[in-house]
Amino acid sequence: MANFLLIHGAWQGKWVWPAVSAELTMRGHEVHSIDLPGSGADATPQDQVTLSLYADAIVQAIKAIGKRVTLVGHSMGGIAVTAAAEKAADSLARIIYLCAYVPVNGDSLSSLSELAPARLPSPVALAHDAIAADTPPSARVETFMQDAPYAVAQWAAPQFRSQAMAPMTTPVQLSEQAYGKLPKSYIVCTRDRAVDPVLQRVMAARSGCSRIKELASDHSPFLSRPTETAEMLHRMATEL
């Protein structure tokens, strides 16, 4: 069975994963998750948060597990796990991207966003100092988790925190010798309103993901479709 390390996306924390973690554990896997610096319960000040700090936190978690890891990145977490994979490729079994941003060498989340089809403006409010961005509470459910049960969405929405901007604007430096050699898979969420499903398919294809599956879910499948999400992760990790 696999040793999963689940990495959350922007504005969120490891609090998103319990339902999926439980489902994966029932399937016989070992499951871990962390709060990225400045996210969830982590108290790192936003002006100190960088993409390199994200990568180092993930690498540290991989080393603590002490086994070959299946690394899962959701949304912005796709950038973070990619940066970490370049530093710890020999400790990874594969990477699975869950409606995530996937860079090739030199990409940043900001540059990838420019590839998306024209859409309505994103519900993101930049702080005055541009160090961090926030999401208006009124937009969180409709943008990120419109398919989630009402009670789950109402529980999740207040837990969003401001998101440091530096990890979103920093280009990722990748090599064929490290990141390039890793097996990669992608789960496209076809009802996603935060990361366009068309962009998801483009990123998956251009980054060499060997397996691309689709899930009829919003941007928060761990809240709206936890059983289906876990089953898909299970199958991708075990090559079923």
Image (cartoon, rainbow, N blue to C red):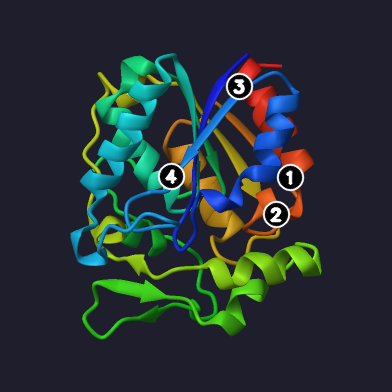
Chain-order first, disc 3 or disc 4: 4
| Image quarter of residue 207 | top left
- Closer to the observer: label 3 or label 2? 2
Does the CB distance between marks 4 and 2 fall below 8 Å? no
Disc 4: which residue: 78
10 Å neighbourhood of mark 3: few (<14), some, or many (≥20)? many
Mark 4–mark 2 Cα distance, whole angstroms, equals 18 Å
Mark 1–mark 2 Cα distance, whole angstroms, equals 6 Å
Could you say which disc has been placed on residue 213 in the image? none
Residue type at numbered disc 3 = Ala
Residue type at numbered disc 1 = Pro
- Closer to the observer: label 1 or label 3? 1
Mark 3–mark 2 Cα distance, whole angstroms, equals 20 Å
Disc 3: which residue: 237
Disc 1: which residue: 226
Disc 2: which residue: 223
Residue type at numbered disc 2 = Leu
